[in-house]
Structures are given as structure tokens and as C-alpha cells.
Image (cartoon, rainbow, N blue to C red):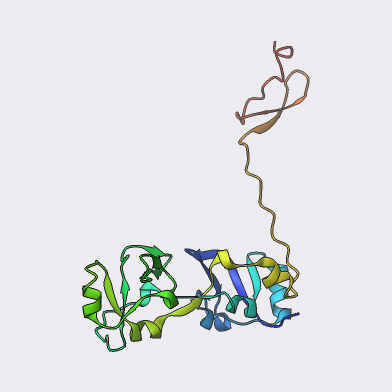
Amino acid sequence: MENEFYLRDTRSDIGSTCMFWGQDGCGYTSNLNKAHVFNAVEAQKYADEKRHFIPLSKSKVDAVTTIRVDMQLLSLNVDFSKGIIVHRRIRDYDGNDIFFDDGNGCYTADYSKAKVYESQDALLQLNQAGAALSKAFLDSICRPTLQAENINHRKMITSAGIKYRAPRKRKESSGKHRHNCPACGKIVWDYNPYDAPYCNLLCEP
């Protein structure tokens, strides 16, 4: 059994990014550097008592993290001494996370895969719209995150030693109401919640 777990709150993902219990109970965070680390006993307690909290193995999560940048932390900056990175899709986000040019004609929210340009001139030669952001600045605000699609429940929960039973999904209601046939008493279902219908033509007066 492993002895270090993050506690995911399944109620509040931000885009594709998971939210976790913050250090010392100080709210919730998508930044794994600020997520509280629980031991196995603590993690199992939450798994038993509150089904929307799911313990995930710290080591398994850390192996599949994605480095991202939260747009709420951006600010104007002009220090391009360590190269620049192009953020082209200014109005497109995954939750709060921004997208970068990967240098291959695509865009990525993974900061570690962003194309780094050594000068503003190199960027201007592309003649493409976007925002130039300081690499030194982005290095200071980027954070490791976990995306829901990268969760492996078997490896991160059960194989790590946690006993967890996912809550059953409630079946959607058909909208019909249960009644008894006014003539024979047979159970019938109908969308009208007030008037009981007859079960067939033979029972109708």
C-alpha cells in the first residue's frame, strides 16, 4: 500500500483540470504543488465517508502531470531577456489555462511543449497575431496539474491500496407517475400526475 495521496474533489473540475484539497485545508487548488498530501489512513477515511472526494496516489499522479499557466496570474511584462513564448489563441482557454504555439502549427495548453523564440524579431517574422509573454515570468507562475482524462482509477486508487466504490448513477426519470386503474386496480403509468387512467379499453366505462 502506498502512503501518499492527493484528494480530488470531483464536483469542481476547471475545464479538463482536476481540483484538489489544498494544503492544511485552505480551500481547493489545481496546483499540485499546493495540494495537501494525505497518508493512507486519512485517504481511506475520506473515501469511506464522502464519495465525491477521491484519493489518488501521489506518485502515480505526479508521473502524468501537465505544466500549465493560469490566465488569472498573467500580468503585463516586458522582460524578454530569456526568450519569449507566443500565446496566440488569446480568447481560447481550457478552464483558466492558456494555449501556446507549439512551433508545429498546433496549439497546446502544456507549457512544457510551447515554442520558445529567442527574440521579438523572430516572432515578428511569423506575421501572426498573438501575445508575446516573458519566459522568465511564465516560469515563475506555471504549475503542475492533472487532467481528468489522465486518471487511471485502477492504478491510482485500488492498486495503491484504497478501497473505493464509486457512487451509482441515478437513472433518469421517465416523467411518468404511478397510478391504479380506477376499474380493476391494476398498476398503470401516465404522465398526468393527478388523474389515474384506465389500464385498457375494457375497463373504461
Q: Residue furthest bottom?
A: 81
97 on left or right of 203? left
23 on left or right of 140? right
Residue 126: image quadrant is bottom left
Front-most of residues 183 and 56 = 56
Residue 44: image quadrant is bottom right
Q: Quadrant of the N terminus?
A: bottom right
Residue 55, given in percent of the width and then of the height, sits at: 66, 73
Residue sitting at x 21%, y 74%: 124
Residue sitting at x 31%, y 73%: 86
Residue sitting at x 73%, y 70%: 158
Residue 72, given in percent of the width and then of the height, sits at: 37, 74
Q: Quadrant of the C terminus?
A: top right
Residue 15, given in percent of the width and then of the height, sits at: 47, 63
Q: How many marks?
A: 0
Residue 137: image quadrant is bottom left
From this view, report whether residue 180 is shown above or below residue 115: above
Residue 161, given in percent of the width and then of the height, sits at: 75, 75
From this view, report whether residue 113 is shown above or below residue 182: below
